[in-house]
Each structure stands twice: as structure tokens, then as C-alpha cells.
Image (cartoon, helix red, strand yellow):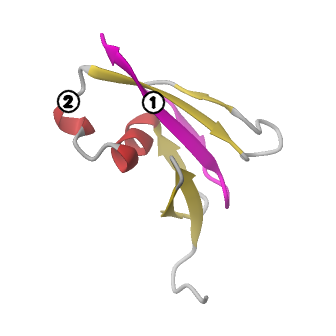
Amino acid sequence: MAQDSKTVTIIVEGTPHQWPFGTKISYAQVVTLEVPTYPQHPEITYSVTFSNADPNRPEGILVAGSSVSVREGMVFNVSETGQS
């Protein structure tokens, strides 16, 4: 499948999403892909983990305010941790 613009496919909770190649994705952006109402409910906190990332940092945890460079096939898991 040819793509006009350079994108990679990332997986958030089993759902594929296209993301611009060579960019980063933030904690808030990942959570919003899984929970579209997140911007209206910032009091709810989430645990975000990722895998299949850069060989120098193949897996890790994203916390509020942080971001990570995206790679083709990167996998994110988002789970609600409750209210702060």
C-alpha cells in the first residue's frame, strides 16, 4: 500500500494508528488516541507503557509530560490508574 506522506503504524491497545514518520508522540497524545475524552478529564491518570521501540530503548514507560520517538510497529498499552 503506497502512502503519499511518510507515516508509521503504531498500535495503541490493539488498534493501529498512523503517525508522522520521524516525530515523537507524547503521553497525552497516546492517551487521547485510546481515550478521546482524555483532554476533558485530565484528573484521570493513566499508565502508559511501550514496546518495540528504538533498539537503544526498546521498551519503557511514558509519564505525563514526556514523549518518545515513534517507530514502525511500536506498541503502546494504556490503562487507567484512577484519579489523582
Q: Is residue 31 above or below residue 72?
A: above
**Going from the N terminus, do you reach mark 1 or mark 2 first?**
2
The residue tagged 1 is 79
Q: Is residue 52 above or below residue 65?
A: below
Q: Amino acid at mark 2?
A: His
Per the picture, the main secondary structure of the magenta-coloured stretch is strand
Indicate left or right for 77 with 55 as reference.
left
Place of residue 74 in the rendered image (x, y in percent of width and height, measured from the top left): 65, 51
Among all residues in the image, which is located at the extreme left? 40
Residue 24: numbered disc: none
Residue 41: numbered disc: 2
Q: Amino acid at mark 1?
A: Ser
Among all residues in the image, which is located at the extreme front? 14
Magenta highlight on residue 72: yes
Among all residues in the image, which is located at the extreme bottom? 2
Place of residue 57 in the rendered image (x, y in percent of width and height, measured from the top left): 76, 35
Q: Which residues are magenta?
A: 65-84
Quadrant in which residue 39 is drawn: top left
Q: Quadrant of the C terminus?
A: top left
Magenta highlight on residue 17: no
Place of residue 41 in the rendered image (x, y in percent of width and height, measured from the top left): 20, 29
Image label count: 2
Say what secondary structure mark 2 lies in. Answer: loop
Say what secondary structure mark 1 lies in. Answer: strand
Q: Is residue 53 above or below residue 72?
A: above
Tell me whether circle 1 and circle 2 mark residues in contact (CB < 8 Å).
no
Among all residues in the image, which is located at the extreme top? 84
Label 2 environment density (alpha carbons within 10 Å; few <14, some 14–19, many ≥20): few
Residue at screen point 61% across, 88% down: 1
